[in-house]
Image: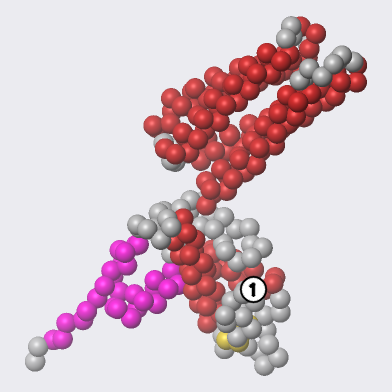
Amino acid sequence: MPTEERSSDFCPTCGKEFTPRSLQEHCSSSHLGSFCFFPNSKLTLAKEDDGRMADELLAANEKQGEVRTKDGRFRCNWPGCKKKDHAYDGIASLRRHLRAKQREEYQRYLKDATNGVGPAPQVNYQVIEAWNDLYIKRAWRDAAFHCLGLLITPLGSLDEVSFGRRQFILNNVIEADNQFGEAVYNIKSLTRNPRNANFWDRYNDESANFRQRLLAWASTPELIPDITYEWRFINDIIIRTNQILEHIRNVGA
């Protein structure tokens, strides 16, 4: 009697072989990404780890509210979930539901990232968060520097009060640039693309020049013959460094 062949399919992400039914279950609750979507969770993994993600989902669900019902079942507390407050007989069932919800949110994110066109990219949320942090720190630094530019616009006589205000803002620029520099270092430690090597060298040169002129202005302002020219010169450096960073991001990690 001939043996009936067993049909099988392969996961497009990990390449593992499954029966059609098992593949459907696998794809609905596996490959959960490296960033936890449960509200208020701050977990970001260096690489995808479904086990750790599932543990975080259970912990976040418990922090969100009471998990056990009066009859000893387990409740989903994910805000906005269609099955929120639905009770599960066992913790394994709740865990499977939370994994499926994480997978659903992850796929929605990937679809938004590509506008629904083309294959979903491999997303490193640690890099995304690092770039977001860099943009925030850069906006703070650049805003402080432009405030400085407003104060040096000729509006009449420059008295001691205006001088003191300029130095105060200048010190704010330096403080903001310190934090921006830390954000840049974080990006550099996470990106290893050799095509960016020359651009990082250019960035380092421009950044050192920016820092040197800024500190000279702060320490010996009386030696700056034309502060309007100096501000414009430093602003040009800022523009160039921002353009270099955008190129580095466009090239990718």
At 29% from the left and 78% from the top, the residue drawn is 19
Find out whether residue 231 is within the magenta segment. no
Viewer-nearest residue: 51 or 179 = 179
42 over 86 or under it: above or below: above
107 over 136 or under it: above or below: below
At 43% from the left and 28% from the top, the residue drawn is 197
Name the amino acid, label 1: Pro
Is residue 211 visible in the rendered structure shown here?
Answer: yes
Image coordinates for residue 22, horizontal then vertical, percent: 35, 78
Image coordinates for residue 207, horizontal then vertical, percent: 59, 23
Find out whether residue 16 is within the magenta segment. yes
Choose top left, top right, bottom left or bottom right for residue 132: top right
178 left or right, relative to 94: right
125 over 68 or under it: above or below: above
Viewer-nearest residue: 6 or 154 = 154
- For numbered disc 1, what is the local secondary structure? loop
Task: Magenta stretch: give its range.
Answer: 3-30
Viewer-nearest residue: 184 or 229 = 229
Q: Which residue is mark 1?
A: 79
Q: Residue furthest left?
A: 1
At 64% from the left and 35% from the top, the residue drawn is 138
153 over 40 or under it: above or below: above
Choose top left, top right, bottom left or bottom right for residue 239: top right
Number of numbered discs: 1
**On-image quarter of the C terminus:** top left
At 35% from the left and 57% from the top, the residue drawn is 118
Image coordinates for residue 90, horizontal then vertical, percent: 56, 85
Choose top left, top right, bottom left or bottom right for residue 58: bottom right
Image coordinates for residue 235, horizontal then vertical, percent: 63, 23
Is residue 171 visible in the rendered structure shown here?
Answer: no
